[in-house]
Amino acid sequence: MRVLDSKDALRESLVELRRGGAETIALVPTMGALHEGHLSLVRAARSAADTVAVSIFVNPTQFGHDEGFATYPRALKRDCELLAAEDVAIAFAPSAREMYGGGEADVTVDPGPLGAVFEGASRPGHFAGVCTVVAKLFGLFAPDVALFGEKDYQQLLVIRRMVRDLDFPVRVLAVPTVRDTDGLALSSRNTALSPAEHTAALAIPRALADAGAAAERGERDARAIADEMRSALACAPGVEPDYADVVNPDTLEPLTALAADARAIVAASVGDVRLIDNAPLAAVPAASTPGAPR
Ligand code: AMP
């Protein structure tokens, strides 16, 4: 595996790989401090292309002030060991200076309305930072496929929209969320949780599981499900909820009636750590109520 920190070296390596027979390249953009969630993206990438590249870049432009850019976990050596064991061809880990040439980008990508709600409302500028860095990575790697986790569901939608609206010639593949055995979605940020905070954070997957159970029981009032999640999180000790809602899986519009593939989305802080999670809600079709024809 080549570990590269400059754009020039990356371009050269990509040319060499293509000359050497690489036909399809899959890119997995990450901020490092890798865990099994990232590795499931890498494994999906390996099935989707003959050559896998991973970027490791804690992108300053997607962090607001006081959003923990400086304290975000960094573990480059271990990350590279994990990626080498996964048969990754290139790990690209540039500095912020290398990515942005010393200043912030003058030209940025406007994420549009999908980037203005939920995470975008709570973290102004976040998705402009995400879209801009991902657009730069697409420009640098020219990948055939790029993989993103459903864990960051809104990010996945915003990137898909950017690819559609700006005609990036890349196929975006989504990978399901990988969870700890106790249900907490894996996140690089989890390492900053104390054991007590980790236990408190389990209120988040529990609220999502309860929402899923309500949907499976036949509850069709999406607002009631969202209210239930909000009050469960509000009552959870050590948890400071930001939002909890049941939304259309393509537009993120809050639903009143549960529709097929509705998505429950949650953001909450536990101590200093902001956590996000989401889950699909399987709406029971109206036709499956007892006695109704199937
Ligand atoms: P990050 O390093 O947190 O920016 O994440 C890089 C990529 O990994 C993003 O596409 C995330 O959605 C994805 N990812 C992060 N955590 C998980 C997880 N627990 N399961 C699946 N994908 C994840």
Image (tube, rainbow, N blue to C red):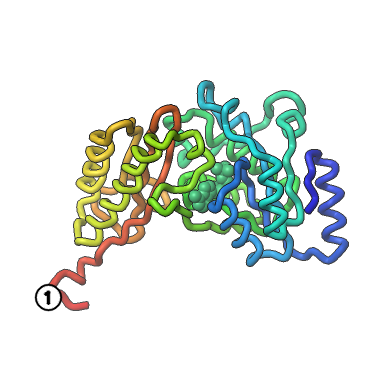
How many numbered tags mark residues here? 1
> Furthest residue to the left?
291
> Furthest residue to the bottom?
293
Q: Confirm or reject: label 1 Cβ below 8 Å from ligand 1.
A: no
Q: Position of residue 187 (x, y in %)?
A: 50, 43
Q: 208 left or right of 114?
A: left
Q: Position of residue 115 (x, y in %)?
A: 48, 38
Specify the quadrant of the image occupied by residue 130: top right
- Tag 1 secondary structure: loop
Q: 40 left or right of 259?
A: right
Q: Where is residue 148 in the image (x, y as percent from the top left)?
A: 56, 52
- The residue that label 1 is drawn on is 291
Which residue shows up at 29% across the image and 48% down it? 255
Q: From this viewpoint, is residue 149 visible?
A: no
Which residue is more in the foreground, 71 or 142?
71
Specify the quadrant of the image occupied by residue 23: bottom right
Say which quadrant the C terminus sits in.
Answer: bottom left
Specify the quadrant of the image occupied by residue 107: top right
| Mark 1 neighbour class, 10 Å CA radius: few under 14, some 14 to 19, many 20 or more | few
Q: Where is residue 216 in the image (x, y as percent from the top left)?
A: 24, 61
Q: 223 left or right of 70?
A: left
> Furthest residue to the top?
65
Amino acid type, callout 1: Gly
Which residue shows up at 39% across the image and 32% down it? 270
Say which quadrant the N terminus sits in.
Answer: bottom right
Which residue shows up at 69% across the image and 57% down it? 85
Q: From this viewpoint, is residue 259 visible?
A: yes
Which residue shows up at 62% across the image and 47% down it? 166
Which residue is more in the foreground, 40 or 279?
40
